[in-house]
Amino acid sequence: MKIIISPAKSLDYRKPVPVADFTMPRFLDRSERLVEALRQLHPAEIGSLMSISSKLAELNFERFQQWHQPFTLDNARQAVYAFDGDVYDGLDVRSLNDAQVGYLGQHLRILSGLYGVLRPLDIIQPYRLEMGSKLSVDGAKNLYQFWGLQITDSLNDELAAEADATLVNLASEEYFKSIIPASLNARIVTPVFMEYKGDKPRVVALMAKRARGMMVRFMAEQAIGDVEDLKTFDYGRYAFSPDLSEGDRWVFVR
């Protein structure tokens, strides 16, 4: 079983990382090709590509200029500790114990516009590049074309070695689109988190992001090995709703 989540726009390279272990991203050669293309852009072009302010455009211009191999713990940090958004607030990886972080290492994968797919302890240098960015590189019109089947094939390789070939999709739609479901040799279970507002449940983006992180935490703390056990998820007062769920789209409400 593998779990996928999205990265975060916000990064934290200041707080100490409580683990010394690390691994290297698997597609650094492809990442370098993207960085080479991004280095050719002026800050204003980066701002237009990413729809960000001039201040953020300058920051990311500098990031791409400074990005270089080899990656070390002096110039990079483990991905699950570097990302700092709502999903990662819900996960709160710093409060997990070694065994639980080990579970994440085995099961959790983070999709990334720059790095393709990351293991939690893969070290990364700071960047911003959303998967939906329309960056033209090597004949590809966007990052979906650039990554092609690579992310799907990487997940297939890992899932082939597992007893339970299930993908738990906790990524946003933008990032899930980097996977080709028809080519993925796995069952895909997609949890959806809803809030009751009056009589009708609806998805509230901020709450849903945090809930995705909480579900990853739940899986690590409970050492979930059977996807059916996800239906017992109750963090944040969420509960599985058989009535609202359909097929492998599992709805949790509160």
Image: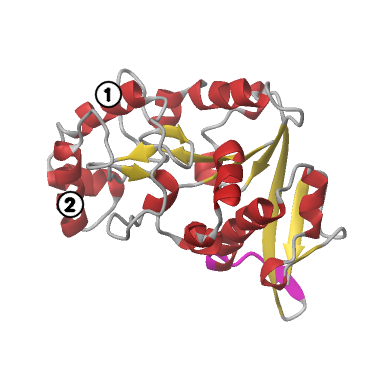
Q: Secondary structure at mark 1?
A: helix
Q: Secondary structure at mark 2?
A: helix
Q: Residue at x 70, y 52 (%)?
A: 191
Could you tell me the amino acid type at mark 1? Arg
Q: Which residue is mark 1?
A: 33
In the image, is residue 139 above or below residue 93?
Answer: above
Could you tell me the amino acid type at mark 2? Leu
**Residue 112 drawn at (x, y percent):** 43, 39
Q: Which residue is mark 2?
A: 59
Q: Is residue 179 left or right of residue 185?
A: left
Res. 90 in view: yes
Q: In the image as oriented, which residue stretches furthest toward the right? A: 243
Residue range in magenta is 200-206
**Residue 88 drawn at (x, y percent):** 48, 58
Residue 204, image quadrant: bottom right
Residue 205 is a magenta residue: yes
| Quarter of the figure that contains the N terminus | top right
Q: Foreground residue, 174 or 48?
A: 174
